[in-house]
Image (cartoon, rainbow, N blue to C red):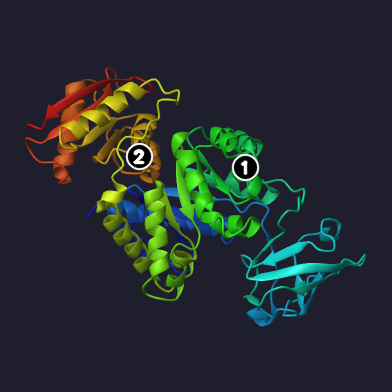
């Protein structure tokens, strides 16, 4: 069975070897995420090379997403790198000194924190596992807190300050250095953490444009103000990631299910890519099979209409990275076969996209003829993405002479992209595409297909729809 939703797998210590990258590709990974919160530039460079080598051997073209760390505030190193438990009701000192942390004293790497918090402020550690209420702020820099919950943490865990404006930019100097480095590599997407408004993405776009014009930028929605400003952020971005970990900590875990649906719907109506991330199969970090709740969570994200679902710790540090991707693939296939997923033709007529009439005609024609495949010839990938967003259940096969476009379409729902050099004559182009589909076993002789193309094979020329029978 072939899934329509795409899978993003985060690479890390558990999955960065060539052999495991190969297995992740075979299991159904479409895009690899490189997390700059935990990787060095040198390690990322080696990983990118390994991805391309393994993909080439399998005749695949996965996308690569570089995820910038952003202004993520973390705890320091714990004593002997142990995991410590903070008990509810205990007194905890937050220290500005670079000391080894334990259950009583925690170093948080943020100078000037005493000027941002006050009595009654909340400090959340390790995705909210530890909730601290500030009781007293000392001029010395120490902050004394009461633990409101029992929770564990270890070295370099994330810290959140809900409702507090820390006054730091979304793009840090580390991000700028990492971005400058990674833009020299064969990547397709850059994700920015802790986006608050459109300006954050506009700033990123300007930096990217200095070196590359072919990179798609993704806004990670992790803060409540980002959710409130989602329409302007979408306009400034190529897509969003619903990063439910920090978003749930910064807002409330009770409203995340509805907020997720809203964000996915907003992205789809804007014709932009959307990824759902964080804790999708969290228990598979240590267990071979997921919980029933996790399986349901993955299925619901698919039914909500996401383009992609993402694995983080499950593949980066987990004991079962390949099994996690296989599990996601199996859930996706079963969910997409059900009648609950069969919602035909999403209305995108409000988007200012000239070829929309041709795309919508192709989707309707495909349904009328028994959901025949739709083949799209595209230079930029825009027409293929538009058709994907209409959400036809028919197979979508995209052909592009640009390898970057092919790899970027690896993130788009229900699109199988192919690299194809465009012939000067349209009949020759169609014949080459048909041969590729036949060789891949995706069509048979005498099958009907719908063809969406331009009368000239150049960017922005989509103006033609044909219904053709394969006669090769």
Of 169 and 86, nearer the camera is: 86
| Image-quadrant location for residue 355 | top left
Q: Residues within 10 Å of mark 2 (few under 14, many from 20)?
A: many
Q: Which mark is residue 114?
A: none
Taking the image as shown, residue 211 lies to the left or right of residue 298, namely right
Q: Considering the numbered disc 2 on the image, is that residue within a helix, a strand or a loop?
A: helix
Q: Residue furthest right?
A: 139
Residue 228, labelled with which disc?
1
Q: Quadrant of the N terminus?
A: bottom left
SS of the residue under disc 1: helix
Q: Is residue 155 left or right of residue 416?
A: right
Q: Which of marks 2 and 1 precedes in the sequence? A: 1
The residue wearing badge 2 is 406
> Residue at left 44%, top 49%?
64
258 on left or right of 4: right
Q: Residue at x 56, y 48 (%)?
A: 220
Q: Is residue 325 above or below residue 214?
A: below
Residue 40, x across and y down, in percent: 58, 59
> Where does the image place residue 263, in percent across and percent down from the top left?
51, 44
Q: Label 1 to label 2, Cα distance in Å?
A: 33 Å
- Residue 194 horizontal/vertical position (percent): 63, 49
Q: Nearer the viewer, residue 281 or 405?
A: 281
What is the quadrant of the C terminus in the image?
top left
| Residue positioned 36% across, 24% down in the render | 356
Q: Is residue 31 visible?
A: no
Few, some or many residues within 10 Å of mark 1 (<14, 14–19, 20+): few
Q: Is residue 94 above or below residue 365?
A: below
How many discs appear?
Answer: 2
Can residue 14 be seen?
Answer: yes
45 and 21: which is toward the camera: 21
Give x and y (percent) for residue 469: 10, 30
């Amino acid at each position: 069975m072939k899934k329509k939703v795409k899978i993003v797998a985060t690479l890390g210590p558990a999955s960065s070897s060539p052999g495991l990258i190969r297995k992740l590709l075979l299991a159904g990974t479409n895009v690899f995420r490189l997390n700059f919160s935990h990787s060095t530039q040198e390690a990322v460079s080696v990983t990118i090379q390994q991805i391309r080598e393994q993909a080439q051997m399998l005749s695949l073209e996965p996308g690569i997403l570089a995820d910038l760390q952003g202004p993520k505030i973390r705890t320091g190193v714990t004593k002997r790198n142990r995991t410590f438990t903070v008990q509810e009701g205990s007194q905890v000192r937050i220290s500005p000194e670079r000391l080894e942390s334990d259950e009583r004293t925690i170093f948080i790497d943020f100078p000037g924190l005493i000027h941002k918090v006050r009595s009654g402020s909340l400090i959340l550690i390790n995705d909210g596992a530890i909730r601290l209420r500030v009781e007293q702020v000392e001029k010395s820099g120490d902050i004394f807190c009461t633990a409101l919950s029992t929770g564990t943490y270890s070295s370099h865990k994330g810290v959140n300050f809900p409702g507090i404006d820390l006054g730091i930019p979304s793009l840090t100097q580390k991000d700028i250095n990492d971005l400058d480095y990674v833009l020299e590599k064969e990547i397709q997407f850059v994700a920015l953490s802790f986006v608050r408004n459109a300006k954050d993405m506009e700033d990123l776009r300007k930096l990217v444009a200095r070196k590359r014009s072919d990179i798609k930028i993704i806004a990670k929605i992790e803060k409540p103000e980002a959710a409130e400003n989602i329409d302007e952020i979408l306009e400034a971005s190529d897509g969003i990631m619903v990063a439910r970990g920090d978003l749930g900590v910064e807002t409330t875990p009770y409203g995340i299910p509805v907020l997720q649906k809203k964000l996915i719907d907003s992205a789809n109506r804007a014709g932009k890519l959307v990824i759902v991330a964080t804790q999708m199969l969290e228990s598979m970090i240590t267990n071979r099979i997921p919980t029933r709740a996790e399986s349901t969570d993955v299925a619901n994200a698919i039914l909500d209409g996401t383009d992609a679902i993402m694995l983080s710790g499950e593949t980066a540090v987990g004991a079962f990275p390949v099994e996690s991707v296989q599990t996601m693939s199996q859930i996706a296939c079963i969910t997409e076969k059900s009648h609950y997923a069969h919602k035909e033709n999403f209305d995108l007529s409000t988007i200012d996209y000239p070829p929309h009439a041709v795309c919508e005609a192709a989707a309707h024609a495909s349904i009328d003829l028994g959901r025949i495949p739709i083949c799209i010839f595209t230079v930029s990938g825009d027409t293929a993405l538009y058709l994907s967003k209409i959400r036809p259940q028919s197979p979508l096969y995209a052909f592009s002479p640009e390898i970057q476009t092919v790899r970027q379409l690896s993130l788009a729902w229900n699109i199988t992209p192919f690299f194809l050099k465009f012939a000067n004559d349209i009949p020759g182009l169609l014949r080459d595409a048909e041969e590729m589909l036949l060789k891949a076993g995706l069509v048979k002789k005498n099958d009907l297909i719908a063809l969406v193309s331009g009368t000239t094979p150049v960017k922005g020329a989509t103006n033609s729809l044909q219904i053709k029978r394969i006669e090769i």
